[in-house]
Image (tube, grey):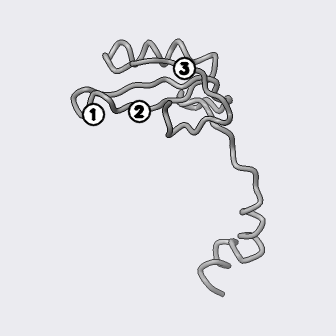
Amino acid sequence: MNIFTMSGLGFENEQQAGHRESPGAVCSRKACRAEATWQLLWNNPRIHTPDRRKVWLSCQEHREWLEDYLQTRGLWKETIPFEKTTDPGEVR
């Protein structure tokens, strides 16, 4: 017995775990697991340089809520479509 088999993650389970489909990009709204269709670009001017953009992903249902949240705090910069080929860490 070793630390890998104690937790049920033996070699055979590791191989199966590696073949699971990775989840697609999902909405950043708490508890939402819907597919992302929008990128909300934002930054906090108190801690980020002006050209820095952070990204929240959003489904259609939560886009307005997340934009409002960021706009209320003066953080929102822009919202652009999110396509499956887009890397969420890479902004235009």
Mark found first going from the N terminus, 3 or 2 = 2
Q: x, y percentage for residue 76? A: 39, 18
Q: Which residue is mark 2?
A: 54
In the shown orientation, is residue 65 left or right of residue 72? right
Cα gap from disc 1 to disc 3, whole angstroms: 20 Å
Q: In the figure, 24 relative to 75: above or below?
A: below
Q: Residue furthest left?
A: 46
Q: Which residue is mark 3?
A: 80
Mark found first going from the N terminus, 1 or 3 = 1
Q: Residue furthest front?
A: 92
Task: Choose top left, top right, bottom left or bottom right for residue 68.
Answer: top left
What residue is at 26 percent from the left and 32 percent from the top?
Answer: 49
In the shown orientation, is residue 72 left or right of residue 33? left
Cα gap from disc 3 to disc 2, whole angstroms: 13 Å
- The kind of residue tagged 3 is Ile
In the shown orientation, is residue 18 left or right of residue 77? right
Does the CB distance between marks 2 and 1 fall below 8 Å? yes
- The kind of residue tagged 1 is His
Indicate the secondary structure of the residue bearing disc 1. loop
Q: Which mark is residue 48?
A: 1
Q: x, y percentage for residue 46? A: 21, 29
Cα gap from disc 2 to disc 1, whole angstroms: 9 Å
What residue is at 44 percent from the left and 25 percent from the top?
Answer: 41
The one nearer the camera, 33 or 36, is: 36
What residue is at 61 percent from the left and 35 percent from the top?
Answer: 86
Indicate the secondary structure of the residue bearing disc 2. strand
The one nearer the camera, 59 or 92, is: 92
Q: Which mark is residue 4?
A: none
What residue is at 66 percent from the left and 36 percent from the top?
Answer: 85
Indicate the secondary structure of the residue bearing disc 3. strand
- The kind of residue tagged 2 is Lys
In the shown orientation, is residue 65 left or right of residue 60? left
